[in-house]
Amino acid sequence: MDFRPQTLAGSTETKDSMLKSKVLSPLPFLLEIGTEELPYGDVEDELAQLRERVPAWLEELRLEHGPVRVEATPRRAAVYVESLSPGQPDREDLVKGPPADKAFDPSGVALPAAIGFARKNGVDTQDLVIREENGGKYVFAVVKSAGRPTPEVLSEALPGLVASINFDKSMRWNDSGVAFSRPIRWFVALLGETVIPFEYAGVVAGNLTRGLRPYDSPEIEVPSADKYFDVIRDAGIVIDSEERKTLIVEQVKKAAASIKGEAILDPALLDEVTNLVEKPTAVLGGFNDEYLTLPREVLIAVMKKHQRYFPVQSVEATRQGQPGSALDKASSQSGTQSSPNGSPLRPYFIAIRNGDDQHLDLVRQGNEHVLNARFADADFFVREDLKHPLEYYRAGLKSLVFQSKQGTMWDKSLRISILSSDVAEMIGCSEIEQANAVKAGQLAKADLTTQMVIEMTSLQGIMGREYALRSGVPEDIAIAIGEQYETVPKTKIGLAIALADRLDSLVSLFAVGLAPSGAKDPFGLRRAAIGVVQSLIEHDIDFDLAKAIKKAATLPLEKASGEIQSQVLDFIAGRLSVLLKESYRYDVVDAVLAAQSANPASAARAVKQLQAWVEREDWDTILPGYARCVRIIRAAPTEDRGPKTVDESKFIESSEKALYQAIQSTVHGQPSTVDELLSIIVKLIPAINKFFDEVLVMAEDEVIRHNRLALVGQVASLANGIADLSKLEGF
């Protein structure tokens, strides 16, 4: 296909005459950016950026418009605007000038400053006005400007819109020096039937789009902006990503059902495939059932990662068990693979072709040949790996660098093993579980040096589990090895080694100055921190992060100072805050984390309880009463603060005695939860309000003043270790 830059196809007008042509009424506008196939992730980025940018861009251009629609495929991004105004509205701007006393003399004669200011803005000095601003008087000019025609505005602004699209990785492909994800090959820019001429990256806009790649990308004329989506659909292109996804799901399910199977529709794979095609067509293929003896995860990983195929499993119900029993062998007679992690796999796959259903047999055969070759490689890797027990592969960790200043993966595995023992004890593991956590920690990273994981790193942990089982390692240890990379491990031993691994990474890398900065997080420390807090919350286990971090800080080659430990704790608290604020009010989260950030599960429980309290109808009577106690303590001079013993004999007013007696009868030890705290406060509110209404706390007599502050301090201190309620709205 000839991808030379096109001229203004279908038009005999010059650029100037087109821009000056009178547009009398609103018209639809279309911009299509045609490229070589973009990586699937860049399609999403392009789509998201244009959807956010275009409405703001039109507002900046002062062009009124109707609804905006943005769609994208691997080869094109389309921006469609309904009812774009024919031109910018005229406008008046009030421009500030010099101080009035510098612009005019006392008699009102214009001075050079006023004359220059008026000339600069195209107005007469007589039209300047004087206004007060910020305590001073200044001259202002009312500057009128006529709106420009929309074609002229768009022609000038469209290159900037395209240039504003950014990608993580870009390339340059011609002398223009423009960088884009992939080479730009064409532009379609139409206002109604009129081509909006602009040039960018050496490509001139016109009214010619391109058809499907499998059909040799034929040129297709777009007669007008409002006909674009009809033209694209007639060309067989499904430009709406949600529509493409729906078609893929329907076709994949239908193909699986044709062999009485069920497709495994992984959401991430579905999103990826959706952005790799413009016309999806499902292709059902098969592979040698002898490969069903491979672990289920290996088969699925090869199909998904290398080939982007959807695996097929049996629809009949299967027994459920633990991941460790994935050793179950396949039965070649039944043509299925047993697995407790899902229904048995079938020896089939479903690929998505970019194009129609012509010559599907050839397409199927080609895909089958490639997949069988991939499985043959995987089978070889697994058989080679199984020549040795998992323990054997630990030695290879000595040559695998974790981080130059913090040693090898061998060093890290030793740290994980040591820390796993402490963590296991902290999360309530039995002595046997603690011992197993130590062993699991030793073996956790061993599979990193196996051939199968070197080939497919996504299988780390999974292969460790499989090889551990086949090496005779106890099942609960093997399961823990397999769970270590899950965001939330299911077993306590798995949780212990996952927490140990993540805390070690955080402490070790912070200690050598590798904390995440901005968007850069090459070691995935944000993910590690989220894994720590989310696991503890979902298991609902009280856990002292400060204590665990302190222990972890002593293990790396480069030790973590107290300051570094605080940074790690704050970093984890930041992730905890983000996680909780997805579901709860920001001020509620801030109030709890001010007191409990080192115990994620307890903090989550407290946030949930406090959210319920602040939503109560009587909350506006509860918080103010407690707040009065806190505020007066904080406002007191330093010498009057601090824990003081209340002396009942020093009471003068009856309301002092009443509050004291209410505290004595209601408070039985320090409350441990938000519910306990606020239930106590509710009972004390009448006595608190009566006390403040009748008693002068800051009395001149020092003894009386200190005694009264000590009394209200008993109320204020009830929230210690639970929440800082002063961070709540309305405090």
Image (cartoon, helix red, strand yellow):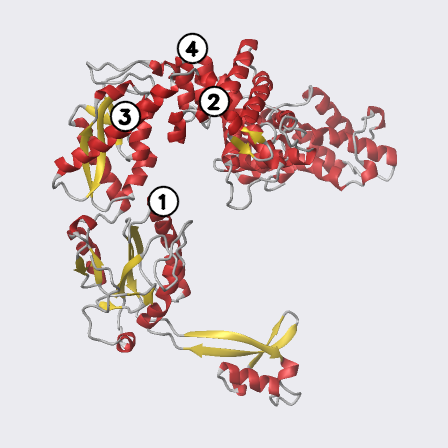
**Do labels 1 and 4 touch, CB within 8 Å?**
no
Which of label 1 and label 3 is nearer to you?
3
Which residue is under mark 1? 41
**Do labels 3 and 2 touch, CB within 8 Å?**
no
Give x and y (percent) for residue 197.
29, 69
**Residue drawn at 23 percent across, 47 percent down:** 278
Label 4 and label 3: CA atoms lie apart by 26 Å
Q: Mark 2 or mark 4, which has the lower sequence index?
A: 2
Give x and y (percent) for residue 646.
80, 26
Examine the rendering and report whether any part of residue 172 can be seen: yes
Label 1 and label 3: CA atoms lie apart by 30 Å
Q: Point out which mark residue 376 bears.
A: 3
Question: Is residue 245 shown left or right of residue 221?
Answer: right
- Seen from the viewer's position, the closer of residues 267 and 86 is 267
Q: Mark 3 or mark 2, which has the lower sequence index?
A: 3
Q: Point out which mark residue 446 bears.
A: 2
Question: Mark 2, residues whose alpha carbon is within 10 Å: few (<14), some, or many (≥20)?
Answer: many
Q: Mark 1 or mark 4, which has the lower sequence index?
A: 1
Which of label 1 and label 2 is nearer to you?
2
Give x and y (percent) for residue 261.
20, 24
- Seen from the viewer's position, the closer of residues 3 and 96 is 3
- Using the rendered view, name the quadrant where residue 322 is placed: top left
- Residue type, label 2: Ala
Give x and y (percent) for residue 530.
51, 33
Question: Is residue 507 shown left or right of residue 271?
Answer: right
Mark 1 lies on a secondary structure that is helix
- Seen from the viewer's position, the closer of residues 322 and 477 is 477
